[in-house]
Image (cartoon, rainbow, N blue to C red):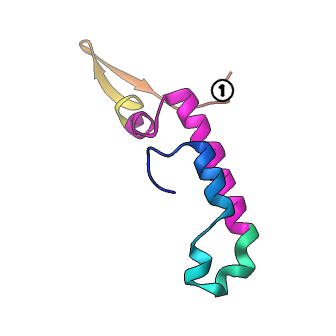
């Protein structure tokens, strides 16, 4: 499920077949929460893939945001998705 090449559809299928429960049956009572967390991850991953093209591009946000040198000057960019 953590393979960067797997698709969101595969991740959603994996959410229904969590192998962790066979290793630790004591976690069975938390199955709904695990599914919820996996769905949240899948939703976020879809947004990242849609807007940043992939997880690697997203992880390199530090190259764009904060203080950076750009053509002889210093540029400051801040991530503020709901700013108007």
Position above or below: 24 against 41: below
Residue 80 placement: quadrant: top right
User: In the rendered image of this protein, does residue 12 appear above or below residue 56?
Assistant: below
Outermost top residue: 71
Report the quarter where the C terminus lies: top right
Determine the residue positioned at 39% across, 38% down.
Answer: 56
Residue 35, given in percent of the width and then of the height, sits at: 70, 62
Asked whether 72 or 62 is in front, the reply is 62
Which residue appears at 62% of the width and 48% of the height? Answer: 42
Q: Is residue 12 left or right of residue 78?
A: right
Residue 6 screen position, x and y as percent:
50, 46
Residue 82 appears left or right of 56: right
Q: Which residues are magenta?
A: 33-61
Instruction: Tell me: 65 left or right of 23.
Output: left
Picture residue at 65% right of the left edge, 87% below the top:
26
Callout 1 secondary element? loop
Residue closer to the observer: 45 or 82: 45
Please tell me whether residue 69 belongs to the stretch shown in magenta.
no
The residue furthest bottom is 26
Q: How many marks?
A: 1
Residue 45, magenta (yes or no): yes
Identify the residue position indicated by label 1 in the image.
83
Instruction: Classify mark 1: residues with Cα within 10 Å, few (<14), some (14-19) or many (20+).
Output: few
Name the image quarter holding residue 27. bottom right
């Amino acid at each position: 499920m953590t393979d960067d090449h797997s698709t969101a559809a595969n991740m959603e299928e994996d959410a229904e077949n969590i192998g962790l429960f066979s290793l630790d049956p004591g976690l069975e009572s938390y199955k709904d929460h695990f599914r919820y967390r996996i769905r949240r991850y899948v939703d976020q991953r879809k947004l990242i893939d849609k807007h940043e093209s992939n997880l690697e591009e997203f992880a390199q946000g530090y190259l764009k945001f904060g203080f950076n040198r750009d053509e002889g000057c210093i540029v400051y960019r801040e991530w503020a998705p709901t700013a108007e």
